[in-house]
Amino acid sequence: MFQIESYISALLVLLLLKDLGFAEAELHNKQLTIFAEAGRQECYLQPIAASENIRIDYQVIHGGHGEPHINFNLMDPSRRLLITDVKQEKGTHQLVARETGSYKLCFDNTISSFNQKIVAFTLGVTAADRKEQELRNLRKEMLTDYQFDLAYTSIDNYISKIRVNFDRSRQTQDYIRTIEARDRHVAESNFEKVNIWSAVHLLAMIIVGCLQVIMLRSIFSLNGRFYKFWKCF
């Protein structure tokens, strides 16, 4: 009985360590879709500690009526350039933070004078490898019993599958959200064009109708200037 209770206690401890491991492995994971206006620069600040791992993925999903290109810059807390991309459609970067502070991400659309860009990007910040190694060593020291090892492995595999399926569902939802944003932008642009052309056609019809009324009245008016003009022909 005491041995079973020991197994249960150890299992709860390892599950707690598993949760801590997930928290350390993924400190921040932000996924955003932004609108970069023409001739402007959109910047974001993210606090990051030294020795943490940084991963940045971005892609221009809609380039307006021009090329789907944008400039990207990443600066450290001292505002030194760490990454510079010029006229890129997408990019992926990984690096290790050298100092603690607010890192600045900028999407620069000053290369375009009229076209608004839609950019989807993901910023992931994970803990340093040293902490992960310490956590793995602690797990290895606690997994001394064979039966407990089997039970832990089964639970760990089950939790890992749930985590993988959850991440896939989240990525699918993010992709659908970015496509929806692009389609909404195209629909709004087309709606505006249709309204403008409808107004132009309506104005032209009104002008033509007025001219027709004036010309018909001038034909039957004997004292009007238009009647004398038509009489010459």
Image (cartoon, grey):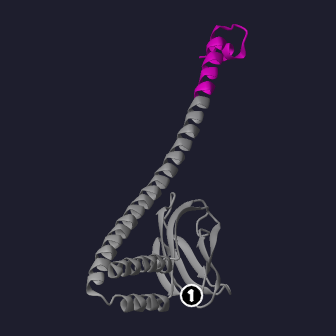
Q: Is residue 174 left or right of residue 28?
A: left
Q: Quadrant of the N terminus?
A: bottom left
Position of 106 relative to 52 (above/below): above
Callout 1 amino acid: Ala
Query: Residue at horizontal 60%, vertical 74%?
Result: 106
- The spot of residue 120 in percent (x, y) is 50, 65
Give the structural element (helix, strand or loop) at label 1: loop
Q: State which region is magenta.
A: 205-233
Q: Is residue 139 left or right of residue 185?
A: left
Overall secondary structure of the magenta section: helix
Q: Quadrant of the C terminus?
A: top right
**232, 186: nearer the viewer:** 186
Query: Residue at horizontal 47%, vertical 89%?
Result: 129
Magenta stretch containing residue 229, yes or no? Answer: yes
Query: Residue at horizontal 37%, vertical 76%?
Result: 8
Position of 159 relative to 126 (above/below): above
Residue at mark 1: 97
- The spot of residue 145 in percent (x, y) is 30, 88
**144, 186: nearer the viewer:** 144
Position of 122 relative to 76 (above/below): above
